[in-house]
Every structure is written in C-alpha cells, then in structure tokens.
Amino acid sequence: MSRMHYRPNEFADLAGVSVKTLHRWDESGKLKPLRTVGGHRYYTDEHINQIKGIAKTPRQNVIYCRVSSNAQKPELENQVEAMKQFCTASGITIDKVVEEIGVALVVVSMARVTTRKSSKRTLTKILTNL
C-alpha cells in the first residue's frame, strides 16, 4: 500500500539511493522534493514514478588512462594493463577503456568536473560515447 508523504531517509530506502544522492538530485534539478512550511524536504508517490527513470540508469565502469606525448605510449600501455589487473583483482567489471595522448588532464570530483573548459568538453565527449 502506498503512502502520501515520505521523509528523505524513507524515500532514499525506497529508491535504493542515499539521502546524499537525493540532495544532489535536488540541487541539480533531477528530482525536486516538496517542502514543508518549515523548509523540510518530503517526497510523494508521484516522486516514486519520477525516479523510475532516474535511479535505474545503469552504471558503467570506465578505465581512463593518459600520457602527455607519443613518446610515452609504452607507459600508456602499462597504465592500461595495471588498471585492468587492479579491476580484475577487485572484482570490477570493465565496460570501456579510454586512452588519451596529450589531451588536457580531467579531474572529476564528486560528479563535478573541476578544470578548464576544454577539459570539460573532453570529459563530456568521453562520457557521451560510452
């Protein structure tokens, strides 16, 4: 039987995500909760229907290796091999391997890209070609 309102921790359990993920979805506009007069967040059965398209997105594991020049290509091959070995030993399935030579370094932290615009374009291109 469904309920009318859910607290963030209750809704996170139903959605199979963390409360922090719900906060991120709120900040990014993916899933906006309703708010009480006091400003507290709450969710409804309608939100459950909305998350079916958000929470079910499959996650892909991507190995990203980079060197600065063609002269370092053997090192790139070593990096890829080391990452494959690490993933295999850790039980991580590899969905894609991305290798780059001489492209600006991309730093990803907590789902935010923190670097120059050209690097943001590079990461966007990588992620959209998965």
Image: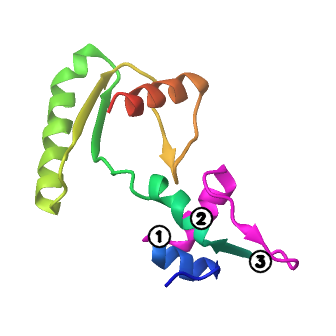
The tag on residue 40 is 3
Which residue in the rendered view is the most extreme toward the front? 1
Work out whether mark 2 precedes mark 1 in sequence or the reverse, and give the earlier one. 1
Viewer-nearest of labels 3 and 2?
2
The residue labelled by disc 1 is 15
Q: Give whichever of 45, 9 is nearer the camera.
A: 45
Question: Does 46 lie within the magenta span?
Answer: no
Locate residue 7, reporting x and y percent.
Answer: 64, 81
Q: Residue drawn at (58%, 40%), measured in percent from left and top?
A: 114
Q: Is residue 121 above or below residue 26?
A: above
Mark 3 neighbour density, 10 Å: few (under 14) some (14–19) many (20 or more): few
Q: CA distance from mark 2 to mark 1?
A: 10 Å
Query: Range of the magenta residues?
Result: 16-39
Q: Give whichever of 2, 68 is nearer the camera.
A: 2
Q: Are marks 3 and 2 in contact (CB under 8 Å)?
A: no
Check disc 2 and report its element: helix, strand or loop: helix
Amino acid type of the residue tagged 1 in the rendering: Ala
Q: CA distance from mark 3 to mark 2?
A: 16 Å
The residue labelled by disc 2 is 47
Amino acid type of the residue tagged 2 in the rendering: His
Q: Are marks 2 and 1 in contact (CB under 8 Å)?
A: no
Question: Does 25 lie within the magenta span?
Answer: yes
Q: Give whichever of 129, 67 is nearer the camera.
A: 129
